[in-house]
Image: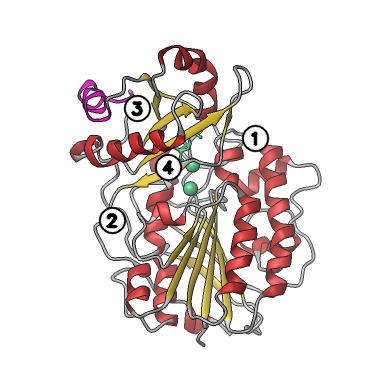
Amino acid sequence: MKFNRVVVIVMDSVGAGNAPDAAAFGDTGANTLGHIDSHVPGGLAAPNLRRLGLGQVAQIHAVETEVVGSYGLMQEISAGKDTTSGHWEFMGNPVETPFPVFPNAFPQDVLQSFTEKTGCSYIGNEVASGTEIIERLGQEHFRTKAPIVYTSADSVFQIAAHTDVIPLKKLYRICDITRHEVCVGDYEVGRVIARPFVGTPGAFVRTGDRRDYSRMPKRKMVFEYLTEKGLCVVGVGKIGDIYAHIGLTESYHTANNTEDMAELTKQLLAHRHQSGLLMANFVDFDSQYGHRRNVPGYAQCIETFDTALGTFLSLMQEDELLIITADHGNDPTWHGTDHTRERVPLLLYSPGLREAVDLGVRQTYADLGQTIMDNFRAGRLAEGTSFLSELR
Ligand SMILES: O=P(O)(O)O[C@H]1O[C@H](CO)[C@@H](O)[C@H]1O
Ligand SMILES: [Mn+2]
Ligand SMILES: [Mn+2]
């Protein structure tokens, strides 16, 4: 079995529950898909994901469905349950040492360095929810013209600014300096994130111009192996940012899931003459609904995605393989606002596959990357087991 193209969709945070090491993360019992399904009247309607085997791997209510995809679960070996750890592990770089987190916000020396290097003062410096902190500090931000600095439970240095106070380009420059000159050494967070927002007090809205500045991976990952072989690697949404823009031949930033699917479809059709990888991260599940603990919103987001997925599946050819997965959980019924340590679904589809195969529980997310390496005869990763030969 060999596919000319592999398409990977990461449904950001759509976990399937029960990671064996969930206790170490305070997440015993968290179950993103299971809990959403049980909280929605009538349960989740996701006929296309079910056709690919979602009902076989997630604890969602039973619906009689003909399964045409192959399916399994993957569990993470990385030390963190953040986006970067998950994505890097997919592509052969599990994160062994946790990225630094700041449960009491940033120490004074980091902030002093921030002020010196960027020439900006700051307000905030809290562990906060991004939507809540801009409402609470928005007026002070207008008065002082200082960016709002905050962190989350995961390893991030977030910088929020209204676009009328700090123009987008300037915010990006501040983030770039923070990434390269401030968050270094013991403060090398997973990501520095630009959080521009617009609107008026009481109605501030974050825009789709968010940018993530990743730390540099220490190991070579799948993208580089593929591009070295002359294959194309096209990223959609946050993919370029998450992989520090290494090994991509093209990258298309998007503002939301709708744009992700539109761009992914466009790129599926545009690159038919080439061989390689096309990968998208659909972030809305996580950022709009998971962190906001919005159960009906999350359910609706899955159902909307499912409908768009139906159209995407109908466009696929026999020599194209689609892999759908997630990078961690973010159970909207859980306490707090952080991600949850869960196994993630692994759903495969190709019109070229004739049988639905149960791929079981994969012991690392790197099985995904190893399968891609195997498919393109691009060598072997140190971690992961290919499931290519299991497909029928
Ligand atoms: O509250 P907001 O700003 O959405 O923060 C969320 O977004 C960040 C990146 O995914 C995470 O750290 C998470 O907590
Ligand atoms: Mn994520
Ligand atoms: Mn998140």
Residue 345 within the magenta-colored segment of the rendering? no
Residue located farthest toward the bottom when viewing the structure as drawn: 1
Residue 103 got which mark? 3
Where residue 15 appears, as percent x and y from the top left, is 55, 51
Of tags 4 and 3, the one toward the viewer is: 3
Q: Secondary structure at mark 3?
A: loop
Where residue 329 appears, as percent x and y from the top left, is 52, 47
Label 1 Cα neighbours within 10 Å, binned few <14 / some 14-19 / many ≥20: some
- Above/below status of 391 relative to 43: below
Q: Could you tell which of marks 4 and 3 lies nearer the N-terminus? A: 4
Which residue matches tag 2? 217
The type of residue carrying mark 1 is: Asn
For the C terminus, the quadrant is bottom right
State the separation of the CA atoms marked 2 and 1.
Answer: 33 Å
Nearest the eye: 180 or 386: 180
Q: Secondary structure at mark 4?
A: helix
| Point 66% across, 76% down: residue | 316
Asked whether, in this view, residue 58 is left or right of residue 165, the answer is: right
The type of residue carrying mark 2 is: Pro
Q: Could you tell which of marks 2 and 1 lies nearer the N-terminus? A: 2
Which residue matches tag 1? 294
Q: Could you tell which of marks 1 and 4 lies nearer the N-terminus? A: 4
Q: Could you tell which of marks 3 and 1 lies nearer the N-terminus? A: 3
Q: Which residues are magenta?
A: 105-118
| Residue 155 visible in the shown view | no
| Residue 9 visible in the shown view | yes
State the separation of the CA atoms marked 4 and 3.
Answer: 19 Å
- Mark 4 close to ligand 3, CB under 8 Å: no
| Point 21% across, 25% down: residue | 116
Of tags 3 and 2, the one toward the viewer is: 2
Which residue matches tag 4? 23
Nearest the eye: 254 or 373: 254
